[in-house]
Amino acid sequence: DEPLTGDESRATEVSNVEFPQLLDPIDDQPPATVITAVVRSNDGWRVQGVAQDNGTIRQVLVNGQPAKGVRENFAEWEITLPTLPDSKSITAQSEDAAGNREALPHIVGGQ
């Protein structure tokens, strides 16, 4: 079947055959989250960061509290925490729409 095959190939046309089912890919990769700034403010501690995923990010949690997306799909996010925990650490973790949660959240601070 020129120009697709060479002279050592054979090709034929087949009818009444269903096209095979292609792969059904699933999203099994978690998002990644990075804290980019922690600034003391009059209201507490303003925490800013970025998140990235190959799909839609459902939420970003900072010390268990939902952050607000500043850009689409939490590409940038922020939250103001009224206080810090006794450990003085801040933890940010994302979850995507497929339910994949970051196994290694970003942690800053601590004693």
Image (spheres, grey):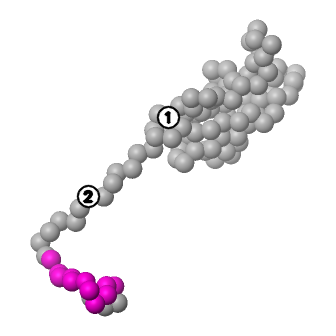
Would you call the spot at circle 2 few (<14 residues within 10 Å), some (14-19), or many (20 or more)? few
Look at label 2 and name its amino acid.
Gln
Q: Quadrant of the C terminus?
A: top right
Residue 77 rendering spot, x and y as whole percentages: 70, 37
In this rendering, the count of numbered labels is 2
Mark 1 or 2, nearer chain start: 2
In the rendered image, the residue lying farthest to the front is 8
Above or below, 89 relative to 11? above
User: Residue visible at 52% across and 47% down?
Assistant: 55
Instruction: Provide the secondary structure element on which disc 2 rests.
Output: loop
Query: Is 6 in the magenta?
Result: yes
Q: Classify residue 71 as left or right of residue 17.
A: right
Residue range in magenta is 4-14
The residue tagged 1 is: 100
Look at label 1 and name its amino acid.
Asn
Above or below, 20 relative to 47? below
Of 110 and 1, the residue lying toward us: 1
Of 68 and 8, the residue lying toward us: 8
In the rendered image, the residue lying farthest to the left is 16
Q: Is residue 83 visible?
A: no
Q: Residue 95 sits in which quadrant? A: top right
User: Residue visible at 51% across and 41% down?
Assistant: 29
Residue 23 rendering spot, x and y as whole percentages: 33, 54
Structural distance between the alpha carbons of marks 1 and 2: 26 Å
Query: Is 3 in the magenta?
Result: no
Q: Classify residue 15 as left or right of residue 71.
A: left
User: Residue visible at 31% across and 87% down?
Assistant: 6
Q: Which mark is residue 21?
A: 2
User: Residue visible at 58% across and 39% down?
Assistant: 31
Q: Is residue 29 visible?
A: yes
Residue 48 rendering spot, x and y as whole percentages: 76, 34
